[in-house]
Image (spheres, coloured by chain):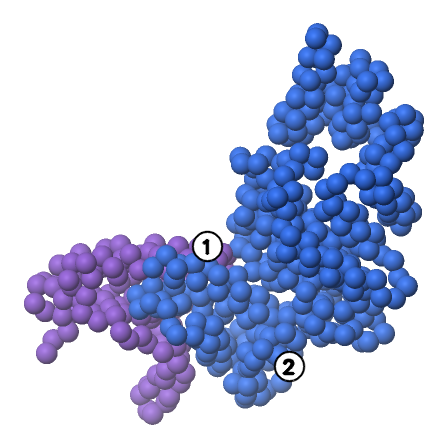
Chain colours: A blue, B purple
């Protein structure tokens, strides 16, 4: 019995986005809700029928058959169609014929999903709602799960999704691949959204570890989807996948019960997922083709070096130079802080301290954590003052606890 | 003992918001409810289901593909149970998951 519950949940995660993509292709993206409803109704019927009778021999085929019947019925019976769809497109009979030809072949599923990926990652609908829509339509997350990932509520998420779908209509986004000459530029958008999805999972403030991991794995799956097509299987696509593999490899090591995040220095490398690291190395090698060095290339190589536990001068020198290069393409305060930490490891405390003082990121608690670290043994009073400032600025209790440990350690050293 | 048909009627409901977990727990409710009837030795048949396809024949030879009913409600599946009385059969219907989503269970004796 338990296995069957697992199966329906698994099947939903596996099939929802495929089915919505295939059906949306038929109905048009402006009616994406109809596709969502048909798929949800199909799963509703599956819950009931399988709950009473047990699972059919080929559950995915069962879902496709029922969804197809429902799509055909929808065309035949639904009154909205007469009012809204028919004036826009062709005659009713043709739609019924199209619905009857609706195919859930592996090839059609793959094509439809790729087209959906480009449609959702369209720059003209860019907004905070876009990530929500991607989570829903491309990854099959429920409204509650999306709300939890954003630390928001159902109503807000529903409103956002509604706005994003409005945008799809207003901008008349179609489910199709962009023309060949536009693919490189559009691919940048797609990769960026996948990167944001991954970050949403990796750095999410939700305490739900399973949800975080699901988000990351979904982002990875979307990335891998792009490698199946020559035009989207670019070096930067592979670099992004490598980056996600390396980060994901440390998932288990990062977590110490109760949702507490274990800092890199304290991680047990035995918990690093070696298979994912090897995958990362494979994609990193593929990403080296061609001349382009994207920020994903640099971040992937930095992440690779973090999968090497031994602290060697070469390691930190490499990481430092990668951060130097990354700052030139893509400045952000956190990259600047990480670069300074690498400088400390590569060139020593004094030099890093001098550089850190120039950053002046005065509202950033990580900045004061770094300063505290760099003042240690040089000026312990300033070190303590920095950690105190960091404690004041820290946003979560977990962070405050970690900083308190540092303060206590400095105090202990004073008294002994 | 007599046999009774339990027909599930499902009303329109916000299933669009359901997540994978929600569907999983909904299926568990159906399993547990059916299992409870079977545990009492009162389940006669769970082996069949209605196809989603169908026709409606109206007076004057008009055949349509539905809607089967005018309101937004659909006929779901059915179970055949055995019980001594209609009241007892209705008691078995308690706990049916359609009731959680404003649906209803119609209980009819199968008369031979």
- Residue at 85% in and 32% down: A344
Would you identify the image quadrant in which residue A25 lies?
bottom right
Which label sits on residue B21?
1
| Marked residue chain, label 2 | A
Marks 1 and 2 belong to one chain: no
Determine which residue is flagged by label 2. Answer: A89
Q: Is residue A190 left or right of residue B82?
A: right
Q: Is residue A124 left or right of residue A209?
A: right
Q: In 3D space, how far apart are the residues under numbered discs 1 and 2 (Cα atoms)?
A: 37 Å
Which label sits on residue A104?
none
- Residue at 68% in and 70% down: A114
Image coordinates for residue A187, horizontal then vertical, percent:
78, 65
Image coordinates for residue A201, horizontal then vertical, percent:
64, 48
Mark 1 or 2: in front is 1
Label 1 Cα crowd, 10 Å radius (few <14 / some 14-19 / many 20+): some
Secondary structure at badge 1 equals: helix
Relative to A268, say whether A356 is above or below: above
Image coordinates for residue A168, horizontal then vertical, percent:
68, 64
């Amino acid at each position: 019995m338990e296995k069957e519950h697992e199966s329906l949940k698994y099947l939903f995660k596996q099939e929802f986005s495929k089915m919505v993509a295939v059906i949306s292709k038929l109905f048009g993206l402006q009616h994406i809700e109809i596709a969502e409803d048909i798929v949800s109704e199909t799963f509703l019927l599956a819950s009931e029928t399988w709950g009473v009778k047990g699972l059919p021999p080929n559950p995915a085929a069962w879902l496709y058959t029922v969804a197809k019947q429902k799509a055909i019925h929808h065309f035949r019976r639904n009154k909205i169609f007469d009012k809204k769809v028919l004036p826009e497109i062709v005659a009713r009979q043709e739609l019924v014929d199209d619905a009857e030809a609706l195919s859930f072949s592996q090839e059609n599923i793959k094509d439809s999903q790729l087209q959906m990926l480009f449609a959702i990652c369209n720059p003209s609908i860019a907004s905070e709602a876009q990530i929500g829509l991607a989570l829903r339509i491309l990854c099959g997350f429920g409204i509650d799960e999306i709300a939890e990932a954003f630390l928001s509520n159902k109503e807000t998420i529903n409103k956002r999704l509604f706005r994003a779908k409005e945008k799809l209509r207003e901008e008349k986004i179609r489910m199709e691949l962009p023309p060949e000459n536009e693919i490189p530029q559009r691919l940048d958008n797609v990769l960026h959204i996948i990167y944001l999805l991954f970050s949403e999972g990796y750095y999410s403030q939700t305490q739900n570890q399973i949800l975080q991991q699901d988000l990351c794995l979904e982002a990875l799956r979307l990335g891998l989807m792009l490698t199946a097509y020559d035009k989207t299987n670019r070096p930067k696509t592979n670099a992004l996948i490598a980056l996600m593999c390396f980060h994901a490899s440390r998932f288990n090591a990062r977590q110490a019960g109760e949702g507490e995040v274990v800092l890199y220095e304290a991680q047990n490398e035995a918990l690093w997922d070696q298979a994912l690291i090897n995958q990362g190395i494979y994609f990193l090698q593929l990403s080296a083709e061609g001349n382009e060095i994207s920020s994903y290339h640099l971040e992937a190589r930095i992440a690779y070096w973090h999968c090497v536990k031994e602290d060697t001068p070469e390691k930190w020198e490499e990481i430092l130079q990668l951060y130097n290069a990354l700052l030139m393409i893509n400045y952000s305060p956190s990259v600047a802080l990480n670069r300074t930490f690498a400088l400390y490891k590569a060139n020593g405390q004094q030099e890093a301290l001098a550089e850190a003082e120039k950053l002046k990121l005065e509202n950033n608690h990580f900045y004061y954590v770094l300063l505290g670290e760099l003042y240690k043994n040089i000026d312990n009073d300033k070190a303590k003052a920095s950690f105190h400032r960091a404690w004041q600025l820290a946003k979560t209790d977990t962070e405050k606890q970690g900083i308190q440990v540092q303060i206590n350690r400095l105090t202990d050293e004073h008294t002994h | 003992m007599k046999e009774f048909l339990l027909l599930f009627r499902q009303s329109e409901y916000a299933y669009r918001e359901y997540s994978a977990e929600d569907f999983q727990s909904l299926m568990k409710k159906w399993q547990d409810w059916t299992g409870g009837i079977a545990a009492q030795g009162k389940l006669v048949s769970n082996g069949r289901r209605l196809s989603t396809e169908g026709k409606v024949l109206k007076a004057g030879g008009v055949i349509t593909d539905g809607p089967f009913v005018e309101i937004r409600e659909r006929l779901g599946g059915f179970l055949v149970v055995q019980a001594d009385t209609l009241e007892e059969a209705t008691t078995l219907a308690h706990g049916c998951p359609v009731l959680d989503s404003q649906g209803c269970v119609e209980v009819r004796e199968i008369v031979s």
